[in-house]
Amino acid sequence: MKTAVEAKVDGRARRGSQVMRTGGRRAWRSTLLEGRPDARMEIVAMRAAREYFNAALSDGPVDVNAKVIHLPRGGVYCKTSVGAVQIGSPPETIKDAMALGLSVPTHFIIPLERFSLRDGLSVSEVEFPAYFNFFILGKSINIVTTKEGEGIVRDVFAETLTCDCDVNVETEFGRFATAEELDAAPDIHRESDYFSKPKDMKPISIDALMRFTHFDENLTATLGDGVTVSIEAEGSIFVVRDGGEEVMRCPTVIMLPPPREDPSRGVATAAFRPPSFGVTVLGASHGFDPQGTTSGFVIWVHGRGVCVDPPPHTIAALAQEGISPRQISAVILTHCHADHDAGTFQKLLMETRVLLMTTPTIKDSFLRKYSRVTGLEQS
């Protein structure tokens, strides 16, 4: 039984697809499987998404007892007989499930649009869901996507997990470090190898952390025990079925809600006056704390701000503090984990030109990672 929102979305998507059709059912299926949705298909999907999320995000408080739940940070959560299935995964998404008392999903469906240029954030961020499932639950997550989509997810995750590159400590830090400090530098390759093989556990690898389920030639993926997800209405709608019964209908494009204000900050009543020297804390927690924001801060020196590892939604947090983007002159990025680099990329993408301060290895990894997830050229 469709809800009023789902029925309206499905009707609009079908009407749009009839108008936009360019070659029939076989053509749009092959286009999606090859990972190259055309502009007309994206227009149909975006129309369906606007209709759906404009209605869904105005529904009021989250009902955790519902079959389908729209998560506060974005993404759609569905309860099935094989466990929770989630469509779209923005940064820090597992904190929503944990805060609501829901089980962290094992099945994640990658949206048609993997990155939201409107919000400057990925909606296919599976790093922390993978870590939670692996280290806490002792299992791998299932990524539902096309074969082409698997390649992108693997490439992005490789930058986070392994970053198979030749790290030269002297090149990385030689401009700033003394000879004595370079002699005391860690053996990065040896440490990486050690931590990739923790004791009493299987080695940490992409294949240990995640498995992939592809959409078949009919654009249907089977999750097990009669649970399937299919792409319908000319590529604009995901349909999840459990035992043949439809349990969720959701657009293939995920639109994120506006970032929520942090009640612990209060609201600035006047423009921020930067100190000669000081620190503004943007977050003081970690990626698995459902109530806290991942660590990040602004260092103030002579009235100029340097943002260190800005967490997701840093732009909104700065605005809540009354801090103007012009007061941040640089961003320091220490490593390419999603809880740190997501806010960095959002700030670089959404605001005025800003200086990125990092090492050559981290810079190259950062550019490769976000080039793959966004489709933008590294240059």
Image: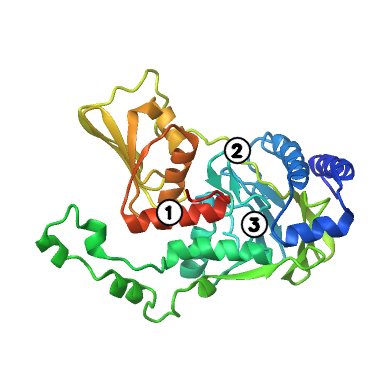
Which kind of residue does numbered mark 1 sit on? Phe
Which kind of residue does numbered mark 3 sit on? Ile
Residue wearing tag 1 = 366
The image quadrant that residue 288 belongs to is: bottom left
Circle 3 or circle 1, nearest the eye: 1
Q: Is residue 336 visible?
A: no
Q: Residue at x 87, y 53 (%)?
A: 23
Chain-order first, disc 1 or disc 2: 2
Which kind of residue does numbered mark 2 sit on? Pro
Q: Residues within 10 Å of mark 2 (few under 14, many from 20)?
A: some
* Relative height, residue 368 to residue 17 (above, below): below
* Relative height, residue 88 to residue 116 (above, below): below
Q: How far separated are the C-alphas under marks 1 and 2? A: 26 Å
Percent from the top left, x then y, of residue 348? 44, 40
For residue 273, the mark is: none
Residue wearing tag 3 = 110
Q: Which one is in front, 243 or 371?
A: 371
Q: Residue at x 87, y 47 (%)?
A: 21
Q: Residue at x 87, y 45 (%)?
A: 14
Q: How far separated are the C-alphas under marks 2 and 3? A: 18 Å
Q: Residues within 10 Å of mark 1 (few under 14, many from 20)?
A: many
* Relative height, residue 160 to residue 53 (above, below): below
Q: How far separated are the C-alphas under marks 3 and 1? A: 21 Å
Contact between marks 2 and 3 (CB within 8 A): the answer is no
